[in-house]
């Protein structure tokens, strides 16, 4: 397994995934702000949260790029289309499990069953992150497919 290529591809893929998710907000496709959500897990400072969250997201991207590398090696396939297939599954994982777990462990997010309090004011994602907009699942899956495609291209 070529870890250097995976780290480089994971960096590029995470940058583009983050850009696609960010572009979806002004287009009205989604309200999810992953760097802010992840950063506000670590810091209550709303001004620092996006930067801290971006670094956290980058580390997560590198971790997932290593997992993609294992899958590429196990199946003996490392193409852009296989990477996109893994990205599709990755996006489903984020929507169905990842954001749901975040909704329960995030110290500043309202509990999905109780709602906001004066100290927990972030909206929980809800089923498939639909609380952040009806196009959020599609944007999330496409972004993760692009991430996987980029990793496949780098790892070929």
Image: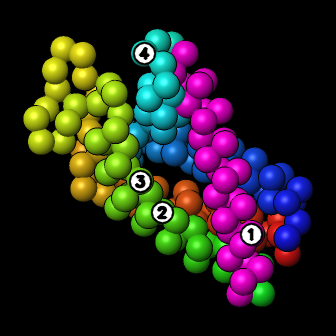
- Judging by the rendered image, the residue that carries numbered circle 2 is 91
Which comes sooner in the sequence, label 2 or label 4? Answer: 4
Pinpoint residue 111: horizontal percent, then vertical percent: 20, 36
Seen in the image, is 110 located left or right of residue 97? left
Q: Is residue 52 above or below residue 128?
A: above
Q: Quadrant of the C terminus?
A: bottom right
Single out the residue that lies furthest toward the left. 114
**Lower sequence index among marks 4 and 3:** 4
Residues 146 and 128: in front is 128
Q: CB under 8 Å between callouts 4 and 1? A: no
Tag 2's secondary structure? helix
Q: Is residue 29 left or right of residue 154?
A: left
Q: Is any part of residue 109 visible from this angle? A: yes
* Sequence-first tag of 3 and 1: 1
Q: Main secondary structure of the magenta part?
A: helix
Closer to the observer: label 2 or label 3? 3
Q: Which residue is mark 1?
A: 69
Residue, disc 3: 98
On-image quarter of the N terminus: bottom right
How far separated are the C-alphas under marks 4 and 1? 34 Å
């Amino acid at each position: 397994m070529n870890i250097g290529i995976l780290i480089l591809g994971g960096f590029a893929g995470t940058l583009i995934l983050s850009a696609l998710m960010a572009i979806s907000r002004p287009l009205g496709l989604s309200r999810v702000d992953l760097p802010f959500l992840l950063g506000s897990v670590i810091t209550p400072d709303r001004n620092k949260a996006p930067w801290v969250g971006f670094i956290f997201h980058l580390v997560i991207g590198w971790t997932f790029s290593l997992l993609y590398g294992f899958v590429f090696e196990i199946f003996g396939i490392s193409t852009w289309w296989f990477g996109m297939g893994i990205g599709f599954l990755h996006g489903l994982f984020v929507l169905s499990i990842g954001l749901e777990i975040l909704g329960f462990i995030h110290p500043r997010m309202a509990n999905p069953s109780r709602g906001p309090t004066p100290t927990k004011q972030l909206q929980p994602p809800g089923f498939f992150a639909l609380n952040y907009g009806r196009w959020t699942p599609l944007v999330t899956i496409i972004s993760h497919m692009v991430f996987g495609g980029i990793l496949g291209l780098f790892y070929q």
